[in-house]
Amino acid sequence: MATTSSDFSAIALALDGTSEAPHFDRRAFKVARIYATLAADGLTANLRLTPDEQEFKAMLAPEAFVPLDNAWGRQGWTTAVLSELSVEDLRAALEMAHAHALPKTKTKRG
């Protein structure tokens, strides 16, 4: 059941357009903007979710998903405890965060 930092990196980098770069003491994963960061110790990751998605994840799996205790957390940033997640749950959470990092598309007015 438990996932690792290697699982995290592999899943994130497989998502369309994702690149990896250093971000302070963490590794950041981004498309148009950062959607996830991996802690230096590889035990946790922070994911960019909406506040509603964060509330839902934390309610369903409080041992796995914890809101950041700051302004970023109130915006939806959520800590994922990798050892508490299956590969499927981690992939679903990363796909959710990835969707928020995609470039905004311009719509034509007609």
Image (tube, rainbow, N blue to C red):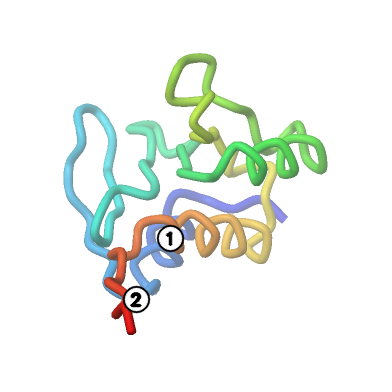
- Seen as rendered, the residue at the extreme bottom is 110
The correct choice, above or below, for 88 with respect to 3 in the image is below
Residue depicted at 58% across the width and 55% down the height: 93
- Of residues 42 and 14, the one nearer the viewer is 14
Read off the residue under disc 2.
Answer: 16
The correct choice, above or below, for 20 with respect to 53 in the image is below
Res 98 label: 1
Q: Position of residue 101 (x, y in %)?
A: 35, 57
- Seen as rendered, the residue at the extreme top is 70
Label 2: few (<14), some or many (≥20) within 10 Å? few
Is residue 45 toward the left or the right of residue 31 in the image? right
Q: Position of residue 54 (x, y in %)?
A: 64, 39
Is residue 69 toward the left or the right of residue 40 in the image? right
- Amino acid type at circle 2 is Asp
Q: Position of residue 24 (x, y in %)?
A: 19, 28
- Amino acid type at circle 1 is His
- Of residues 42 and 90, the one nearer the viewer is 90
- Of residues 104 and 10, the one nearer the viewer is 104
Residue depicted at 63% across the width and 63% down the height: 87
Label 1: few (<14), some or many (≥20) within 10 Å? many
Residue depicted at 34% across the width and 67% down the height: 13
Dot 1 falls on a residue whose secondary structure is helix
Residue depicted at 55% across the width and 43% down the height: 50
Q: CA distance from mark 1 to mark 2?
A: 9 Å
Is residue 55 toward the left or the right of residue 16 in the image? right
Is residue 57 toward the left or the right of residue 30 in the image? right
Res 77 label: none
Snapshot quadrant of residue 88: bottom right
The correct choice, above or below, for 74 with respect to 12 in the image is above
Q: Image quadrant for the N terminus?
A: bottom right
Give yes or no for contact between labels 1 and 2 (Cβ–Cβ under 8 Å): yes
Q: Position of residue 95 (x, y in %)?
A: 52, 64
